[in-house]
Image (cartoon, rainbow, N blue to C red):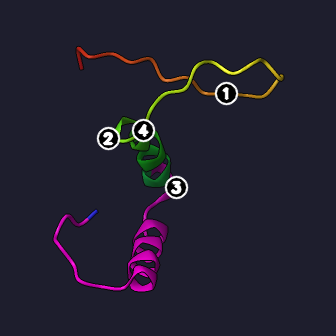
Amino acid sequence: MDKRIRFETKEEANARREREFLELTPHERFMWFLRSFDRPGFTARNKPEDKGNFVIWKKHDPVR
């Protein structure tokens, strides 16, 4: 994604972000999803009670 500073309304920004995301291949979208967990502001929660749902847990590995 482009890191330049932009001056636009929230609606314009959301439309641009959606358009850029939809231009990605399915593999790129999945990788973007996985990388989103490493962003600042994302806080891991305590493990929720097991309800039988399929959950992907990412192991935090500071060596990488």
Label 2 SS: loop
Q: Residue 6, image x and y in percent?
A: 21, 78
Identify the element where label 4 is drawn. loop
In the rendered view, would you say 8 is above or below 51?
Answer: below
Label placed on residue 42: 4
Q: What stretch is highlighted in magenta?
A: 2-27
Side (left or right) of 11 relative to 4 = right
Q: Which residue corresponds to the image point at 42% horizontal and 52% vertical from the top-left?
A: 28
Reading the image, the residue beneath label 1 is 55
| Residue 21, position as x, y percentages in the image | 44, 66
Quote the CA–CA distance across marks 1 and 2. Answer: 21 Å
Label 4: how many Cα within 10 Å (few below 14, some 14–19, many 20+): few
Residue at the disc numbered 2: 40
Calculate the distance from the C-alpha at mark 1 to the C-alpha at mark 4: 17 Å
Q: Name the N-terminal-most of marks 1 and 3.
A: 3
- Could you say which disc has been placed on residue 26 in the image? 3
Number of numbered discs overlaid on the protein picture: 4
Distance from disc 2 to disc 4, alpha carbons, whole Å, reads 6 Å
Mark positioned earlier in the residue sequence (1 or 4): 4
Q: Residue at x 60, y 27 (%)?
A: 56
Q: Quadrant of the N terminus?
A: bottom left
Please tell me whether residue 38 is drawn above or below residue 2 in the rendered image: above
Relative height, residue 41 to residue 62 (above, below)? below
Residue located 78% across and 18% down the image: 50
Query: SS class of the residue under badge 3?
Result: helix
> In this rendering, which labeled residue sits more in front, label 4 or label 3?
4
Label 4 near label 2: C-beta < 8 Å? yes
Q: Which of marks 1 and 4 is in front?
A: 4
Q: Which of marks 1 and 3 is in front?
A: 1
